[in-house]
Amino acid sequence: MSEIEIEQLDIDDLTLTGEQYLLFNVAADTYAIPVTQIREIIEYTEPTQVPMTPDFVSGIINLRGGAVPVINLACKFEQDQQEITKRTCIIIAEVDGSENKRILGCLVDKVQQVRDIPEEAIEPAPKLGSTIDTRFIKNMAKINERFIIILDINNVLSLEELEIVEMMQENSLDV
């Protein structure tokens, strides 16, 4: 396996007391997830497609003998699909399921870095009106005049979508 290249953001180092986040790109946007919710980052592996699943579900991958559903975040966030490159990877995250923790793969275009984000750089999620779904945005971080969207990974999928993913995992274990 080749190593995944991590690109450094051009951001000044700050005196930091905040939480650590993994920063990554989906299309042209930068997102962050607390490192406490991340199990690992793996290089891109073509998921096995599962019929009759939502468009944002790329399929499932085998991770050390376990089936892990992969969510295409660009598709989920209704952004332009980027082509698969050597920087494309899958972030393996732990999310709250209906009954217990679930493992979920998130397809991203590029992982940038792990960094501290100071509390003073974090702002509440913006109110975008009642027709735009923002439940997956936990906060926004403003660093050097750039906004980074801090995801609430537990709310990227709705309860119904999470149930579909859970059924995919359970059914693939029966095979």
Image: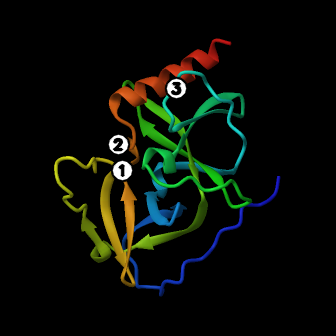
**How would you rate the neighbour count of disc 2 (Cα within 10 Å): few for under 14, some for 14-19, many for 20 or more?**
some
Q: Which mark is residue 152?
A: 1
Q: CA distance from mark 3 to mark 2?
A: 19 Å
Reply above or below: 131 against 114. Answer: above
Residue located at (49% from left, 71% from top): 115
The answer to whether marks 1 and 2 mark residues whose Cβ atoms lie closer than 8 Å is yes
Q: CA distance from mark 1 to mark 2?
A: 6 Å
Nearer-the-camera pick, 116 or 168: 168
User: Is tag 1's residue or tag 3's residue first in the polypeptide sequence?
Assistant: 3
The answer to whether marks 1 and 3 mark residues whose Cβ atoms lie closer than 8 Å is no
Looking at the rendered image, the disc whose residue lies closer to the viewer, 3 or 2, is 3
Q: CA distance from mark 1 to mark 3?
A: 23 Å
Q: To which residue does mark 2 refer?
A: 155
Expressed as whole percent of the image width and height from the top left, the position of residue 61 reads: 67, 34
Expressed as whole percent of the image width and height from the top left, the position of residue 167 reads: 50, 19
Reply above or below: 174 against 135. Answer: above
Expressed as whole percent of the image width and height from the top left, the position of residue 45 reads: 72, 43
**Which secondary structure, mark 1?**
loop
Residue located at (60% from left, 58% from top): 109
Find residue 158 and report its image quarter: top left
